[in-house]
């Protein structure tokens, strides 16, 4: 997930959903009149691969210190708007 936020208030302005982003998505930026916008990127990484009944499975986990938060947001991407960015730590905090 890529989260765009207001650099002065921490308010989340928009997102690009997804677990793994290509170079084009990573280069995306948002501009808004009179608002400085920054972004946080949370890529997901392979946590485990296994074979069950002859079929290969891959499990992923967020590559971020706020793993549990991003797992919850992944279940319902619109829930990201229940958070804002702490401007000092750059972490999501529930509002």
Image: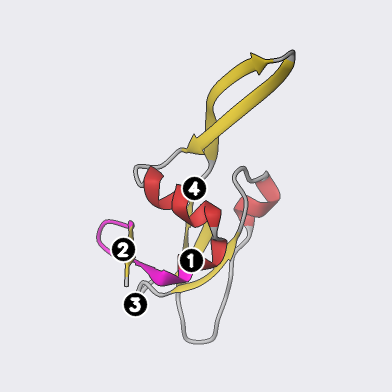
Q: CA distance from mark 4 to mark 2?
A: 15 Å
Res. 43 visible in picture: yes
Alpha-carbon neighbours of circle 3 within 10 Å: few (<14), some, or many (≥20)? few
Which of label 4 and label 1 is nearer to you? 1
Residue at left 49%, top 36%? 61
Say whether disc 4 or disc 1 marks the residue closer to the N-terminus.
4
Q: CA distance from mark 4 to mark 1?
A: 15 Å
Residue hosting label 1: 79
Residue 17 against residue 48 in the figure, above or below: below
Residue hosting label 2: 93
Q: Which residue occupies the foreground of this view, 34 or 56?
A: 56
Q: CA distance from mark 1 to mark 2?
A: 12 Å
Residue 74 against residue 85 in the figure, above or below: above
Mark 3 touching mark 1, by CB under 8 A?
Answer: no
Q: What quarter of the picture does the C terminus occupy?
A: bottom left
Magenta-span inclusion, residue 64: no
Q: CA distance from mark 3 to mark 1?
A: 18 Å
Q: CA distance from mark 3 to mark 2?
A: 12 Å
Residue reaching furthest to the left: 88
Q: Secondary structure at mark 4?
A: loop
Residue hosting label 4: 42
Say whether disc 3 or disc 4 marks the residue closer to the N-terminus.
3
User: Residue 44, position in %: x, y?
Assistant: 53, 39
Q: Secondary structure at mark 3?
A: loop
What label does residue 9 carry, if any?
A: 3
Alpha-carbon neighbours of circle 4 within 10 Å: few (<14), some, or many (≥20)? many
Residue 39 against residue 23 in the figure, above or below: below
User: Residue 12, position in %: x, y?
Assistant: 45, 71
The color scheme shown is secondary structure
Q: CA distance from mark 3 to mark 4?
A: 20 Å
User: Residue 94, position in %: x, y?
Assistant: 32, 66
Looking at the rendering, the stretch of residues picked out in magenta corresponds to: 81-91
């Amino acid at each position: 997930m890529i989260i765009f936020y207001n650099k002065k208030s921490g308010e989340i302005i928009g997102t690009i959903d997804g677990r793994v982003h290509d170079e084009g998505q990573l280069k995306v930026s948002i501009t808004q009149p009179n608002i400085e916008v920054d972004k946080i990127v949370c890529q997901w990484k392979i946590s485990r691969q296994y074979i069950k009944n002859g079929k290969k499975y891959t499990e992923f986990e967020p590559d971020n210190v706020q793993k549990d938060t991003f797992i919850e947001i992944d279940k319902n991407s619109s829930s990201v708007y229940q958070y804002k960015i702490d401007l000092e730590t750059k972490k999501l905090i529930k509002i």
